[in-house]
Image (tube, rainbow, N blue to C red):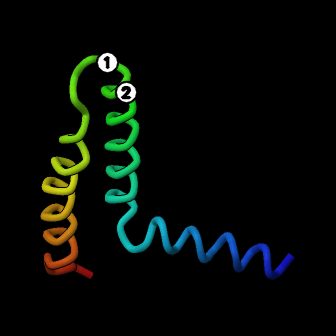
Amino acid sequence: MKRIRAFVWFWYDFIIGDDWLVAAGVVAALVATYAVSRTSVPAWWIVPVAVVILLPLSLWRASRPRSD
């Protein structure tokens, strides 16, 4: 059981990492890409746009001073 818990914790930490909002944004971008790909509209642009939005947001959140 200890190994299974360590395995699951590793993947949780690897995927979610420090910012769960970025992970949720990536999942949302992938879901949107799939949904748009089922139509006649090209879907290649959704993930790059998500990265352009999520990366500065993540950097801004990580670099702002914390008030403890």
Quadrant in the rendering for residue 54:
bottom left
Q: Is residue 10 left or right of residue 2?
A: left
Residue 35's tag is: 2
How far apart in space, not on screen, are marks 2 and 1 (Cα)? 7 Å
- Residue 7: percent from the left, percent from the top? 69, 75
Above or below, comparing residue 38 to residue 30 in the picture: above
Above or below, comparing residue 45 to residue 15 in the picture: above
Residue at left 34%, top 52%? 26
Q: Residue furthest right?
A: 1
- Amino acid found under the numbered disc labelled 1: Thr
Residue at left 31%, top 26%? 36
**Circle 1 residues within 10 Å: few <14, some 14–19, many ≥20:** few
Q: Nearer the viewer, mark 2 or mark 1?
A: 1
Q: Is residue 53 left or right of residue 6?
A: left
Residue at disc 1, secondary structure:
loop
Quadrant in the rendering for residue 4:
bottom right
Quarter of the figure with the C terminus: bottom left
Residue at disc 2, secondary structure:
helix
- Amino acid found under the numbered disc labelled 2: Ala
Residue 31's tag is: none
Q: Which residue is mark 1?
A: 39
Quarter of the figure with the N terminus: bottom right
Residue at left 13%, top 64%? 56
Q: Residue furthest top?
A: 40
**Circles 2, 1 touching at the beta carbon (< 8 Å):** yes
Q: Is residue 20 left or right of residue 14?
A: left
